[in-house]
Amino acid sequence: EIVGGVGIRHILSKEHDFNYGVVTETTNLNVANISVGTGQGIIRLWGDTLYFNPHPNAIYGMAKLMEILGPAYTLQQPGNWMTYEPCPDLPGFPRFNVRKISSGQDYCEIFFDSRIVPGQTNASLTADLEAAVEKIEQEITGLRGEVLVPINSDTTNFPAMPATPADHPLVKVIAAAHAKVTGEQPGIGAGDRIGLASDASHMKAAGIPALDYGPGKHPRWPMSDECVKTADIITATQTLVEALREMHS
């Protein structure tokens, strides 16, 4: 799961015969028919080391680049370094964050995590970041950069896919089953999972309508008492059983 959904990608690579997908991630018992995608990768800068003389210092170059990329996990405004069309279903996104940095005088590398919206891809994110790196290369003569999105072929990202429509049979049957079990209508949309990626996006990319529905609510970190209520597990199970019964009737 933390390397881009390796399990579901393995399943989809084999012969399969399912028409819909329900991922039982924590949704606070709401129907999450859309989620962000992820764009994780590495930016590397190389410079030079000339002791006691001016030189292209990769650490200084990365500092300038991070000024362009902006503060951690803030909304990337249209028209800055990141190109995208806003998604009304995912307000406040896309976002970008640096999670790790390593360096020497002539070398600097960051590992980053971005939460992207439909229309953005690994390729588009790479192009945006390469354009930002190019600005630094032009400003600091002798600096060279590289962008890797994703890091490698095994550690892929979650694609940013459009919402499964609210009037799609899968959404309607899960919502109706929840209402029958609980007596209340569930929320439909990104909801409490906004900002979180999902294996559902891989199924959507494969042409399989999918959504998230499950017990529990994603916590704020750090926390010491992470838990899911037993009653919510029972409710989710009853809802899924009812939905399966309806779909096979």
Image (tube, rainbow, N blue to C red):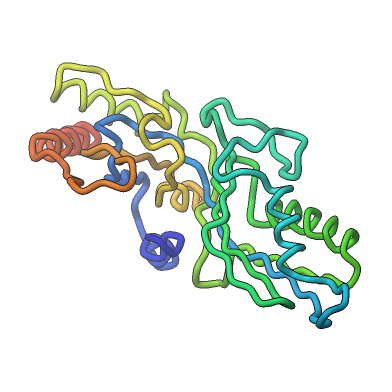
Q: Residue at x 28, y 23 (%)?
A: 186
> In the image shown, does 93 or 101 lie closer to the viewer?
101
- Give coordinates of residue 218: x percent, y percent: 30, 40
- Give coordinates of residue 48: x percent, y percent: 81, 79
**Is 14 on the left or on the right of 186, as rendered?**
right
Picture quadrant of residue 166: top left
- Count of numbered badges drawn on the protein: 0
**Is 191 on the left or on the right of 93, as rendered?**
left
Q: Residue at x 16, y 21 (%)?
A: 180
Q: Residue at x 70, y 75 (%)?
A: 107
**Is 66 on the left or on the right of 212, as rendered?**
right
- Give coordinates of residue 118: x percent, y percent: 59, 40
**Up-down: is 239 above or below 100?**
above
Picture quadrant of residue 175: top left
User: Which residue is situated farthest in the front direction here?
Assistant: 52
**Is 207 on the left or on the right of 22, as rendered?**
right
Q: Residue at x 91, y 68 (%)?
A: 141
- Give coordinates of residue 40: x percent, y percent: 56, 58
Quarter of the figure that contains the C terminus: top left
> In the image shown, does 212 or 168 lie closer to the viewer?
212
Quarter of the figure that contains the N terminus: bottom left
**Up-down: is 73 above or below 110?**
above
